[in-house]
Image: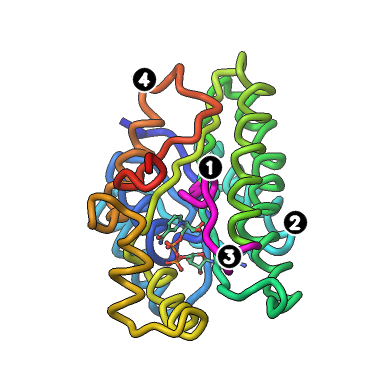
């Protein structure tokens, strides 16, 4: 149902972003994938996506810490695929440390990649969406946009910020056919989660099993990880007709985490 539309998905070489890319391409949208990783592996993923969906899939290496590269990403999408009709602010990193021990470079990188980049991409995409009279802006926030966990000050700060950005732009674009929402997953099994296990083990003096069961899934009443495919299906729903009146919302998908 997305034939003729184009989507930019930041941080889509891995995890949830890659699942969004697959879901959008499968519905016929042309897609710009973005993120870091091994060049050959990214090209293989891009080509496979294009082959299985029949949709056009481009890769753009824009670094989400660089506003000029973010603006160029939107311009390139417009030039080569049209749109952008859909943007998904998804790139994100994590670092786990007490504030006293938190390195400044990690703090700055988290704020830039997880929060500021979304502002710049929305700014760059907005004129195209307003001209088209249609747009979907979706950000991957987190349960950490609603509640906090110790040792994640930068991440929790960035995710709460995404909600404020979402609400503000939803109001600014409300009469332009553009909806702006964020999806707030609980723990999704991806490289981002796997990567924070060693640091959490150190910070909390726990074994790997204790971190998975007593820290990660302890927060989630269903005792199950969210899957990247479930998050992507939710994003597809937000692009459909039935979701036209959903805007400015922070939509939880967290196995009941934030109900507790
Ligand atoms: P991931 O590590 O699998 O993917 C992160 C992506 O971001 C990768 O493609 C990576 O290359 C890209 N990236 C990192 N730095 C970048 C930069 N400077 N410029 C461009 N791209 C960059 O992680 P994920 O778990 O799929 O996370 C995706 C999003 O979902 C993040 O915003 C994360 O905060 C959010 N989220 C994840 C979970 C979870 O449990 N995994 C839960 C809630 C929210």
* Closest to the observer, 247 or 186: 186
User: What whole-number distance in Å separates the C-alpha atoms at marks 2 and 1?
Assistant: 16 Å
Q: Position of residue 21 (x, y in %)?
A: 38, 52
Q: CB of residue at label 3: within 8 Å of ligand 1?
A: no
Scheme of colours in the image:
rainbow
Mark 2 or 3, nearer chain start:
2
The numbered dot on residue 67 is 2
Establish if 38 lies above or below 216: below
Rendered location of residue 34, percent (x, y): 52, 61
Report the Cα–Cα distance between label 4 and label 2: 32 Å
Secondary structure under the numbered disc 3 in the rendered image: loop
**Disc 1 Cβ-to-ligand 1 distance below 8 Å:** no
Q: Which SS class for mark 4?
A: helix
Q: Is residue 113 above or below residue 27?
A: below
Nearer the viewer's eye, disc 2 or disc 3?
A: 3
Label whose residue precedes the other's in the sequence (4 or 2): 2
Q: Are marks 4 and 2 in contact (CB under 8 Å)?
A: no
152 is within the stretch colored magenta: yes
Q: CA distance from mark 3 to mark 1?
A: 26 Å
The residue shown at (65%, 37%) is 164
Task: Write the residue at 23% across / 57% down.
Answer: 224
Q: Which residues are magenta?
A: 140-153
Q: Badge 3 is on which residue?
A: 152
> Residue 213 falls in which quadrant of the image?
bottom left
Q: Which residue is mark 4?
A: 241
Residue 109 lies in what quarter of the image? bottom right
Q: Nearer the viewer, residue 203 or 44?
A: 203
Disc 3: CA contacts within 10 A as few (<14), some (14-19) or many (>=20): some
Residue 95 in sight from this viewpoint: yes
Q: Residue at x 41, y 54 (%)?
A: 57
Compared across the picture, whether 153 is left or right of 252 comes to right
Disc nearer the start of the sequence (4/3): 3
């Amino acid at each position: 149902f997305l034939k003729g539309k184009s989507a930019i998905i930041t941080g889509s070489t891995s995890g949830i972003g890659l699942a969004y890319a697959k879901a959008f391409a499968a519905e016929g949208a042309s897609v710009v994938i973005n993120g870091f990783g091994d060049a050959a592996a990214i090209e293989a993923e891009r080509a496979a996506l294009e082959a299985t969906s029949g949709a056009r899939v481009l890769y753009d290496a824009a670094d989400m810490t660089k506003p000029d590269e973010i603006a160029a990403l939107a311009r390139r999408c417009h030039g080569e695929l049209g749109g952008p009709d859909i943007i998904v602010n998804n790139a994100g990193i994590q670092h786990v440390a007490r504030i006293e021990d938190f390195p400044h470079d990690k703090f700055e990188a988290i704020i830039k990649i997880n929060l500021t980049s979304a502002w710049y991409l929305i700014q760059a995409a907005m004129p195209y969406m307003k001209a088209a009279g249609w747009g979907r802006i979706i950000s991957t926030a987190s349960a950490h946009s609603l509640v906090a966990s110790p040792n994640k000050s930068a991440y929790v700060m960035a995710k709460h910020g995404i909600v404020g950005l979402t609400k503000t732009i939803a109001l600014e674009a409300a009469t332009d056919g553009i909806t702006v929402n964020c999806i707030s997953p609980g723990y999704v099994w991806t490289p981002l989660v796997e990567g924070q296990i060693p640091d959490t083990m150190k910070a909390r003096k726990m074994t790997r099993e204790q971190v998975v069961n007593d820290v990660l899934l302890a927060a989630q009443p269903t005792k199950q990880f969210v899957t990247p495919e479930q998050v992507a299906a939710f994003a597809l729903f937000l692009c459909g007709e039935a979701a036209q009146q959903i805007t400015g919302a922070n939509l939880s998908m967290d196995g009941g985490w934030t109900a507790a």
